[in-house]
C-alpha cells in the first residue's frame, strides 16, 4: 500500500500511519486476513523508528482491527465499514470551497482536523 | 556508459569461479595420483543406498569421470558468469557454484579413495556419510567465500530521461511517499514446501525401511535445506521510496536494490511465468535478467542501466512502477 508521511505535520507519525491503514482497510485495499509488513520492515521502508510503527499497530490492535503475531507481523482481522461515498462527496465540496477561499491544502487539512476534533 | 568496467567484472567473476573451482580439483588429482601405488588395481566406485559397494573400476576411469564432471560444472558456471553476469547477484551465484562444485567433487573423490588406501578392493568398505556431508558443507562455505571476492555493481546513473510515456505518480511536496508490499510465497512456496516436506518424510521413511541412515541424513538434510531456501526466497518485503526500489527477504538475505537514479523505466506487466525464469524464487534467466518470482501474473518490471532488468511478482505493481518512475525523474534533476 501507499503511505504518505508528512514529517512537518503536528499530527504524530504513528497517527498518520494509523489513519492511512484504517483508510486502506475501509477502501478494501487491505483485505481481511491480509498480512501487513512487520513493524521493523515498515519502519525501515518509511525511514522511521520501529517503535513508532509498533505504536500504530498497537492502536489498531486495541481497536480489534488487526492481530499482532510474534514473528509473523500483523494480520487484518476486522473490516472497517465506512459510508465512503457520502464522505467523498462532502470532501469534494470542502475542497472546492477551500480553493475558492484561496486556502492552501495544509490550511484546509488543519480546518478539517479542528472540525473533527470539535465533533469529538 | 562504463561498459569496459562492466565487462571486466564479468570476466573477474568467471576467472574467480574457474580458479577457485579448478584448484581443489587439481589438488585432488595430484593427491589421488600420489596414492596410485597404495590403491588396489580396481577400486570401489559406486555404493548402493545402504552405502555398500556395488561397482568397481580403475583409478583412471574413476578420476576421469568424477573430476571431469567437476571441471565441466566449474567451467559451465564460470561461463554463465561471463555470459549472463549483468547483475552482481548472477555473477556471485555463478562464481559460488563454480567454486563449490569444484570443492565438493574433490571431496567426493577423496572420501571414496581414502578408505581404500593400502587395502585390497573390499566389498565390505562402507562409504563415509559423515565425510560426504562434511564435503558438502565445506563446499557451501567455500562457495559463500567466493561470493565475497566478487565486487558488486558499479554506480551507473542514467543519463537519459525517463520516457514521457512512462506512468507517473503525483508526488506531493514536503511529503514522503512510500509504496510497500509484502510478497507471501504463492505457488512457488507451496511447491517448495511440498517438495521439501516430501523429501524430509521420504528420507525418514526410507531410512527406517531400508535401515539406511545415510539415505535418511542426505534426503532429510536436503529437505530441510529446501524448506529454509523456500522460506527465504519466497517471502519478501518490497518498497519504493525516494532512494529507489528495494526488496528484502524476511530472513534479511537475499536483498535487492535498484537506486532511483539508475532506473530507466518501470512498468507493471501482466504476466511473469514459470517459463520465463524456469522456476520460482530469486532467479536469473537466460537473458541475465533477475527476478523474484513467486507466481504467474502481475509483476513489476524495472529496466536499469547496465543492461539490467529486474522482475518482481507483486500485486499493485502499477502504483509501484508509477512512483518509481517519478522518483527516477526527480533523481535526474537532483544529481
Image (tube, coloured by chain):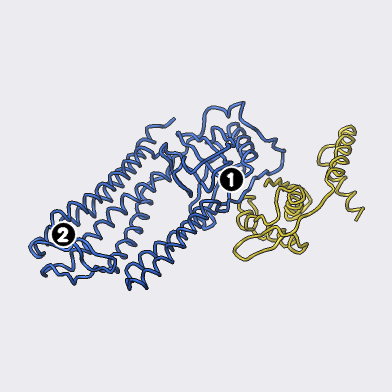
* Chain that is coloured blue in the picture: B
Frontmost of labels 2 and 1 is: 1
Q: Nearer the viewer, residue B54 or B126?
A: B54
**Residue shown at 32%/58% (left/top)?**
B139
Toward the right, the furthest residue is A119
- Residue linked to disc 1: B314
- Identify the subunit bearing mark 1: B
Tell me if residue B13 comes above or below residue B141 in the rendering.
above
- Identify the subunit bearing mark 2: B
User: Circle 2: is it few (<14), some (14-19), or many (20+) Cα within 10 Å?
Assistant: few
Q: Cα distance, mark 2 to mark 1?
A: 51 Å
> Dot 2: what SS?
helix
Q: Nearer the viewer, residue A92 or B296?
A: B296
- Residue linked to disc 2: B31
Residue B287, image quadrant: top left
Please provide percent x and percent y for residue B172.
72, 38
Amino acid at each position: 500500500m501507499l503511505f504518505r508521511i508528512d514529517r512537518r505535520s503536528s499530527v504524530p507519525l504513528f497517527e498518520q500511519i494509523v489513519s492511512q491503514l484504517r483508510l486502506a482497510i475501509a477502501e478494501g485495499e487491505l483485505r481481511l486476513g491480509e498480512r501487513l509488513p512487520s513493524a521493523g520492515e515498515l519502519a525501515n521502508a518509511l525511514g522511521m523508528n520501529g517503535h513508532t510503527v509498533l505504536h500504530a499497530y498497537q492502536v489498531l490492535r486495541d481497536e480489534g482491527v488487526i492481530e499482532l503475531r510474534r514473528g509473523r507481523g500483523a494480520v487484518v482481522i476486522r473490516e472497517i465499514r465506512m459510508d465512503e461515498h457520502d464522505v467523498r462527496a462532502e470532501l469534494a465540496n470542502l475542497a472546492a470551497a477551500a480553493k475558492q477561499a484561496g486556502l492552501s491544502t495544509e490550511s484546509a487539512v488543519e480546518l478539517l482536523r479542528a472540525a473533527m476534533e470539535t465533533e469529538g | 556508459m562504463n561498459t569496459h568496467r562492466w565487462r571486466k567484472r564479468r570476466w573477474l567473476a568467471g576467472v574467480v569461479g574457474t580458479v577457485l573451482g579448478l584448484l581443489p580439483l587439481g589438488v585432488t588429482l595430484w593427491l589421488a595420483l600420489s596414492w596410485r601405488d597404495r590403491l588396489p588395481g580396481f577400486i570401489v566406485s559406486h555404493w548402493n543406498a545402504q552405502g555398500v559397494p556395488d561397482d568397481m573400476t580403475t583409478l583412471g576411469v574413476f578420476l576421469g569421470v568424477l573430476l571431469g564432471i567437476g571441471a565441466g560444472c566449474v567451467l559451465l558456471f564460470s561461463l554463465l558468469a561471463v555470459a549472463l553476469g549483468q547483475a552482481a547477484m548472477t555473477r556471485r551465484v555463478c562464481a559460488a557454484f563454480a567454486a563449490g562444485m569444484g570443492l565438493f567433487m574433490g571431496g567426493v573423490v577423496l572420501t571414496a579413495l581414502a578408505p581404500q588406501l593400502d587395502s585390497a578392493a573390499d566389498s565390505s568398505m562402507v562409504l563415509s556419510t559423515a565425510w560426504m556431508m562434511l564435503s558438502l558443507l565445506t563446499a557451501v562455505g567455500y562457495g559463500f567465500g567466493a561470493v565475497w571476492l566478487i565486487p558488486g555493481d558499479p554506480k551507473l546513473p542514467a543519463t537519459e530521461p525517463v520516457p514521457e510515456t512512462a506512468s507517473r505518480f503525483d508526488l506531493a511536496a514536503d511529503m514522503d511517499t512510500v509504496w510497500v508490499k509484502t510478497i507471501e510465497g504463492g505457488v512457488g512456496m507451496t511447491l517448495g514446501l511440498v517438495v521439501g516436506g516430501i523429501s524430509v518424510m521420504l528420507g525418514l521413511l526410507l531410512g527406517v525401511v531400508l535401515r539406511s541412515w545415510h539415505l535418511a541424513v542426505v534426503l532429510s538434510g536436503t529437505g530441510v535445506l529446501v524448506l529454509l531456501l523456500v522460506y527465504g526466497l519466497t517471502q519478501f518485503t518490497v518498497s519504493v521510496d525516494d532512494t529507489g526500489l528495494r526488496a528484502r527477504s524476511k530472513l534479511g538475505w537475499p536483498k535487492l536494490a535498484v537506486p532511483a537514479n539508475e532506473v530507466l523505466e518501470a512498468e507493471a506487466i501482466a504476466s511473469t511465468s514459470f517459463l520465463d525464469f524456469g522456476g520460482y524464487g530469486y532467479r536469473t534467466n537466460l537473458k541475465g535478467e533477475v527476478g523474484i518470482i513467486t507466481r504467474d501474473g502481475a509483476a513489476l518490471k524495472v529496466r536499469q542501466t547496465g543492461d539490467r532488468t529486474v522482475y518482481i511478482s507483486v500485486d499493485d505493481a502499477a502504483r509501484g512502477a508509477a512512483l518509481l518512475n517519478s522518483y527516477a525523474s526527480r533523481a535526474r534533476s537532483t544529481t
